Amino acid sequence: MLAASSKYSSNSLPLVINILLLTSVIFYQAFTDVKSRENRNLLFLAPIAWIVFYFMDFVEYQALIRSFWRLFRKKQVMWQKWQRLGAREGLLAH
């Protein structure tokens, strides 16, 4: 939403502020974590993490709209149930 509004209004300041804010939060989390040494290799992704956040928001929004549409059409909305198997259990089953 910020990217689209920045494009159409020719004002990129809100987008830049959002990117800087998310980058600083990720840096803060990486450096204050107990295992900060292991997280430092992910810091180069911090400036582009906002793209990932927007993608996740889009997927969640799409799922919400689909659920409302199914409810509106009086179809049943069901949760998926997964049977999770570990590596050893999966090998033993075959």
Image: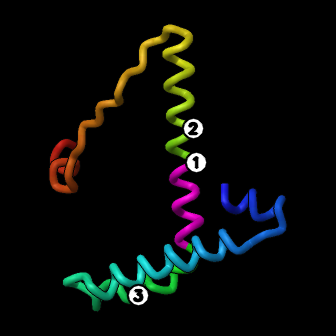
Residue depicted at 32% across the width and 88% down the height: 31
Q: Based on the displayed image, in which of its 4 quarters is residue 94 positioned? A: top left
Q: Earlier in the sequence, mark 3 or mark 1?
A: 3
Q: Is residue 20 above or below residue 8?
A: below
Question: Secondary structure beneath disc 3?
Answer: helix
Marks 1/2: CA–CA distance: 6 Å
In percent of width and height, residue 14 lies at 66, 69
Front position among marks 3 and 2: 2
Name the amino acid type tagged 3.
Asn
Marks 3/2: CA–CA distance: 32 Å
Front position among marks 3 and 1: 1
Q: Based on the displayed image, in which of its 4 quarters is residue 62 positioned? A: top right
Region of the chain picked out in magenta, as a range: 49-58
Disc 3 target residue: 41
Disc 1 target residue: 58
In percent of width and height, residue 71 lies at 49, 15
Residue depicted at 48% across the width and 11% down the height: 75
The reply to whether callout 1 and callout 2 are in contact (CB within 8 Å) is yes
Left or right, 62 with reference to 43: right
Q: Based on the displayed image, in which of its 4 quarters is residue 17 positioned? A: bottom right
Q: Quadrant of the N terminus?
A: bottom right
Q: How many marks?
A: 3
Question: Secondary structure beneath disc 1?
Answer: helix
Marks 3/1: CA–CA distance: 27 Å
In the foreground, 32 or 77 = 32
Name the amino acid type tagged 2.
Gln
Residue depicted at 52% across the width and 18% down the height: 70
Name the amino acid type tagged 1.
Phe
Q: Is residue 87 above or below residue 60?
A: below
